[in-house]
Image: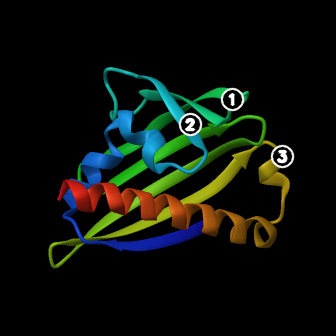
Amino acid sequence: MTETTCLIHASTADVFAILTDGWTYAAWVVGASRVRDVDGGWPQPGHSIHHSVGIWPLVLNDTTTVAQYEPNRFLQLKVRAWPTGAGIVEFVLTDRDGDCDLLMRERAVSGPLALIPHPLVDPVLRLRNHETLRRLALLAEKHH
């Protein structure tokens, strides 16, 4: 499992508000190009964001579904990234004197990406997830 952390100068509530606003997903997730729809029950477990990944004209439609949800503390998502497979992404939020210490964990669970040895895929995921958390921090700190 790849782990990436970031200290965000905003409250855990502000960060969680961005994480659970499905319409902001493409603004902070590296690779997501647009949000097509957000289920009405999002971010409750079983509900999905319908998004696209890639750059036109190579845009693929996909979904991200909530697996677990604990307000202002934890969000677990099942992400599809066709044709590479599916993965689990977790966000763990901890208050640090009014700031948010955010831990992001990611692991492939199916498809070709799951077959690549972790030491080979970890550096790439770490770079992508670092940029994802940087974008999320910018949104949360602006909101804060």
Residue 113 can be seen, yes or no: yes
Specify the amino acid type for callout 3.
Pro
Residue 33: which numbered mark, if any?
2
In percent of the image, x 32 and y 54: which residue is there?
A: 139
Q: Mark 1 points at which residue?
A: 59
CA gap, disc 2 and disc 3: 22 Å
Question: Is disc 1 placed on a helix, strand or loop?
Answer: strand
Within 10 Å of disc 1 (Cα), the crowding (few <14, some 14-19, many 20+) is some
In the rendering, at what x and y percent does residue 104 appear?
A: 47, 63
In percent of the image, x 37 and y 35: which residue is there?
A: 22
Sequence-first tag of 2 and 1 = 2
- Comparing 110 with 12, the one in front is 12
Q: In which quarter of the image is residue 8?
A: bottom left
- Tell me the quadrant of the picture where the N terminus can be found: bottom right
Q: Which of marks 2 and 3 is in front?
A: 2
Question: Is disc 2 placed on a helix, strand or loop?
Answer: strand
Specify the amino acid type for callout 1.
Val
Residue 112: which numbered mark, if any?
3
- Comparing 28 with 78, the one in front is 28
